[in-house]
């Protein structure tokens, strides 16, 4: 049987449980048609690139499906009729990936980057303290405000 990946976007005012229920309904349609869902991933509530039916966000769900074409057409039809589903896209694939999808892998990397070790600091031009970099042998003058009388005194001599 051919393999498919189906992603659908549900309205943002439904709950995650209702999105799971829609996925369960689609799995039921597939089993009746002789197929099965091999992979299911909830990608969370994500922002849309543009408004769809007055929604700015949507719940994303990925289904990895092994089913005959007739069963997949019925799933697409059911998703189109469901009022809670904003958009759906089904593509035929050669193999269903076993690990997490690119979306979930990126999210895990982002979480790790936010709270984890950031690595050693690269050598920079500026040191962390005050002093204008004089610790490293830099003899440039540090710029700061001078008193007015000092400015007047030096202004006429040069």
Image (cartoon, grey):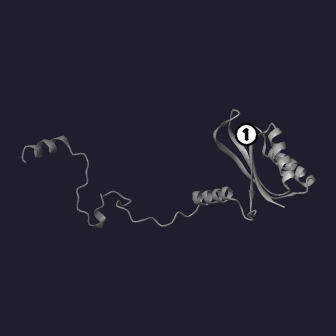
Q: Is residue 54 above or below residue 32?
A: above
- Residue extending farthest to the front is 69
- Residue shown at the point (90%, 51%) measured from the top left: 28
- Residue shown at the point (75%, 65%) measured from the top left: 98
**What percent of the width, then of the height, locates residue 153?**
11, 44
Residue annotated with mark 1: 12
- Residue extending farthest to the top is 54
- Residue shown at the point (88%, 57%) measured from the top left: 35
Left or right: 37 in relation to 155:
right
Count of numbered labels shown in the rendering: 1
Residue 39 or residue 149, whichever sits in front:
39
- Residue extending farthest to the right is 32
Q: Of helix, strand and loop, which one carries label 1? A: loop
**What percent of the width, then of the height, locates residue 92?**
75, 56
Residue 152 or residue 15, whichever sits in front:
15
Where residue 130 sits, quadrant-wise, is bottom left
């Amino acid at each position: 049987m051919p393999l498919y990946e189906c992603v659908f976007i549900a309205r943002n005012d439904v709950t995650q449980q209702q999105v799971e229920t829609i996925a369960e309904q689609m799995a039921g349609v597939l089993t009746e048609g002789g197929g099965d869902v091999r992979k299911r991933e909830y990608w969370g509530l994500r922002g849309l690139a543009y408004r769809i039916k007055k929604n700015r966000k949507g719940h994303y769900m990925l289904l990895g499906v092994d089913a005959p074409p007739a069963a997949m057409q019925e799933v697409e039809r059911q998703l189109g009729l469901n009022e809670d589903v904003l958009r759906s896209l089904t593509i035929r694939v050669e193999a269903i990936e076993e690990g997490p999808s690119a979306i979930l892998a990126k999210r895990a990397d982002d979480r790790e980057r936010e709270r984890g070790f950031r690595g050693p600091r690269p050598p920079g031009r500026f040191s962390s303290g005050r002093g204008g970099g004089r610790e490293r042998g830099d003899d440039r003058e540090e710029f700061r405000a001078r008193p007015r009388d000092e400015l007047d005194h030096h202004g006429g001599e040069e």
